[in-house]
Amino acid sequence: MCGIAGMFAHRDSALAIAPERLIAIRDAMAARGPDGVGLWIDGEARVGLAHRRLSIIDLSDGGAQPMRDPSGRYALVFNGEIYNYQTLRAEMEAQGHRFASGSDTEVLLALFAAHGPAMLTRLRGMFAFAIWDAVERRLTLARDPYGIKPLYYADAQGRIAFASQVKALVADPSISREPSPAGLTGFHLMGSVPEPFTIYRAIRAVPAGSWMTVDASGVSAPVRYASVAQAVAEGRNGGTVDVAEALRDSVRHHMVADVEVGAFLSAGVDSGALVGLMRDCGAQRIRACTLAFPEFAGTPADEVPGAASVAALYGVEHHVRQVSAKEFRGDLPAIFAAMDQPTIDGINSWFVSKATRELGLKVALSGLGGDELLAGYSTFRTIPQTRRVFGPVAHVPGAGSASRSMLKLLAPGLLARNPKLAGLLDLPRSWAGTYLLRRAVLLPFELDGAMDAGLAAEGLAELDPEGLIAATMTPDPGSANGRVAALESCNYMRNQLLRDSDWAGMAHSLEIRVPLVDFTLLQALAPILPGLTPGAGKAMLANAPSTPLPDAIVNKPKTGFGIPVTGWLKGATRDIRTRRSGREWSGEALARYFGDPARLAV
């Protein structure tokens, strides 16, 4: 896990690479890689690559980056982990290739030299990388299928710059900080900035599951090599699935490291099952971290008793970390400094990452992704239900606007208690619209109350939220569960949960691994997804360890990975003021976005 950056002056008219600007971008990501730094610039100063290293696999200098192949043709910077690198390495060694290090980076570089982008489908892991080809004078950028690892770029005046963080790119003063109307609008709609947009007009995300090239002709359109929706669609006609073995296989791969691997542990099924599977996969020592809050003590929201029972069941070294409102107030400026783009979540990930790093761990497994993979969210029930009941009415011209006018006139109190009633008679006209209705923080027609009306109109036109959401469900996964799985995985999980895990974990130099967000696992389990009934998928996960989770954990009402941030912001932190999305936010405004149950409930 690292931070990568680079520049390429792809047009002859573009200015040469300024080393100090590339270094500024790299060092803006110092927390991502405290174990080493690297810089390579070609002799003509037309291309440069930079790296911050968090050493996890091959701790020696043999894994240092930027890495060049023996011929000198290729140079690579890479962020992430290739979990099946040992298998890939053995295959290449059998073909006569010799390696100088024990790193997955060298395997990745050799594979690209041999096969080009075609090798992407063979990688199992989380990754974002850039490879320079000195012969073709071409830069290739790529990301993993789910988009676990971020990669952003800005192209202007014939020169492209890329980095693992948006904030790192704007360390270069030549990159415009003009806000993106689409990015701002997307944030107010969904609580996070939807890819490929960012909060800045000049900066875009390399799409997940895609690669793109830059050469003298400019920046190419992305080429998609992997799709969640496609994997689900292709899995519909699969055969028998050994769920427990597929899960063990993923956990086994995610434990590959030359440092100790710990775990986040809540009172839920996902993290508990992962700890049990870690034990089944041979982990001798497992240290797990659970957050505790005084406000939750003795309530159903308290994760500690359930987590402690799971830790005892699997013989885990359990570390409970207390977090107070005072610590939250003290950390809030650092949280916003580390937050790469605006988000209404991530504070929980910040504190559990902080607590885990305090134990001396550099890697931790997270249960993120279990609900998206195994139909655990209530959206797997409510979205198809809403679509079925209200979809026909939503196709009636004017039904939505008429219902909003009547609600405002006749039942303003009801509308205030449940704002999403205002979209119930027009958004369910499509699966994408229904998803927007269920997951949105603000609905499109509410935006002028949160941002400039002209900016909102421009942002909506560029963003096309329903079209953007619909694209993540293409091709059609073919079942209700499959559609919701694709929608949740490629929108809420990708733009919110995975991104928050990245910036929050990396702020503490902690690599967060997500065994339930694994493309190979998705392909293995896709055949069972259409037939999953509520609770069935999570029951399968709970029973996957050789010692299953107890009924008290399996049947515990879902509370989420929550923290009492709403009370902290509304109460003791009323004096906090910060800037987000180009305007000042008070503690009260932040509280509404971080915890309005009427808007965020699913």
Image (cartoon, rainbow, N blue to C red):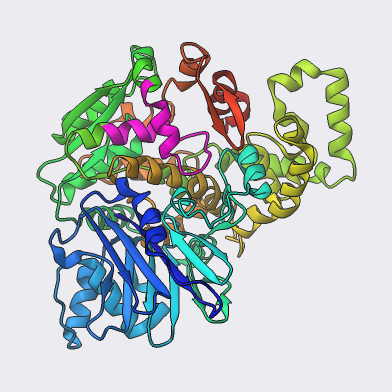
Image location (x, y in percent) of residue 478: 60, 60
- The front one of 499 and 271 is 499
One can see residue 513 in this view: no
Q: Which residue is drawn at 39% across and 69% down?
A: 130
One can see residue 217 in this view: yes
Q: Is residue 342 within the magenta segment?
A: yes
| Residue 294, image quadrant | top left
| Residue 555, image quadrant | top left
- The front one of 563 and 315 is 563
Q: Residue at x 36, y 45 (%)?
A: 540
As drawn, the residue found furthest toward the left would be 284
Taking 340 as reference, is 267 above or below it?
Answer: above
| Residue 58, image quadrant | bottom left
Left or right for 488, reference 51 = right
Give the total number of marks visible in the rendering: 0
Look at the image and tell me in which quarter the N terminus lies. bottom left
Look at the image and tell me in which quarter the C terminus lies. top right
Q: Which residue is drawn at 76% across and 48% down?
A: 458
Image location (x, y in percent) of residue 4: 36, 59
- The front one of 390 and 447 is 447
Instruction: Report the magenta residues as a range.
Output: 330-354
Image location (x, y in percent) of residue 256: 20, 57
Q: Residue at x 17, y 34 (%)?
A: 359
Please tell me whether the stretch drawn in magenta is mainly helix, strand or loop. Answer: helix
Taking 465 as reference, is 419 above or below it?
Answer: above
Image location (x, y in percent) of residue 404: 83, 30
Q: Is residue 197 within the magenta segment?
A: no
Taking 141 as reference, is 44 above or below it?
Answer: below
Taking 322 as reference, is 288 above or below it?
Answer: below
- The front one of 466 and 67 is 67
